[in-house]
Amino acid sequence: MASADLVKRFWVALYDRDWDAVASFFGPTSVYWDVPVGPTAAAKGPADIVSRLKLGLEGLSGYEQFEGPVVEQGRYVVTEHREVWHWPSGETASLPFVSVMEVEGDTITLWKDYWDYATLMNAAPASWHERLATADLSWVYDASADGLAP
């Protein structure tokens, strides 16, 4: 369960918003993408993956994770979990996730998150939507040619 243990340590770093620790789990060719948004809005490499995560999470006043099953098969780790996002203006969103990660050694090489786009977007306040619309997106990586999309 070495890969699952690595992924569990990653989740701890992410929910602590320890961005340096989060970056340490990825290599220069690692890719992260939210499946509902599509592979054309992925991020590649530690710094850009952290930038991608900050886009959604930095504007929150808090968030909680509720762990579900973790399944490891070979180099793949699948985690089912739920996150509750809290915005400073009082809105909340309860988001079920399935995260699929490919792990090689001590590096997460691929991370795909499956969640419901409408659940998040309908719950988020206008200020969060504005933040997305005006953010620096220099981190965007088009992973559609990588053969990652189903």
Image (tube, rainbow, N blue to C red):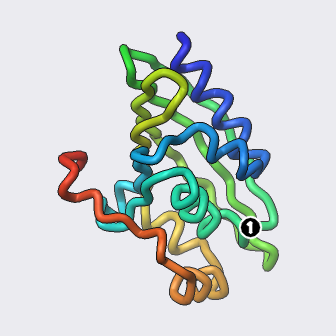
Q: Please determine whether, in this image, residue 127 is positioned above or below residue 54.
A: below
Q: Nearer the viewer, residue 3 or 78?
A: 3
Q: Could you say which quadrant of the image residue 81 lies in?
A: top right
Residue 35 lies, in percent from the top left, at 35, 54
Residue 90 lies, in percent from the top left, at 79, 73
Q: Please determine whether, in this image, residue 110 is positioned above or below residue 49.
A: above
Position of residue 30 in the picture relative to residue 8 (left or right): left
Q: How many marks?
A: 1
Residue 128 seen by the camera: yes
Q: Nearer the viewer, residue 20 or 120?
A: 20
Residue 33 lies, in percent from the top left, at 40, 54
Residue sitting farthest toward the front: 28
**Mark 1 highlights which residue?**
60
Q: Report helix, strand or loop for mark 1.
A: loop
Residue sitting farthest toward the top: 1
Residue 114 seen by the camera: no
Q: Residue at x 48, y 77 (%)?
A: 137
Amino acid carrying label 1: it is Leu
Residue 45 lies, in percent from the top left, at 48, 52
Q: Could you say which quadrant of the image residue 4 lies in?
A: top right
Q: Nearer the viewer, residue 42 or 89?
A: 42
Q: Residue at x 43, y 64 (%)?
A: 117
Q: Residue at x 50, y 64 (%)?
A: 119
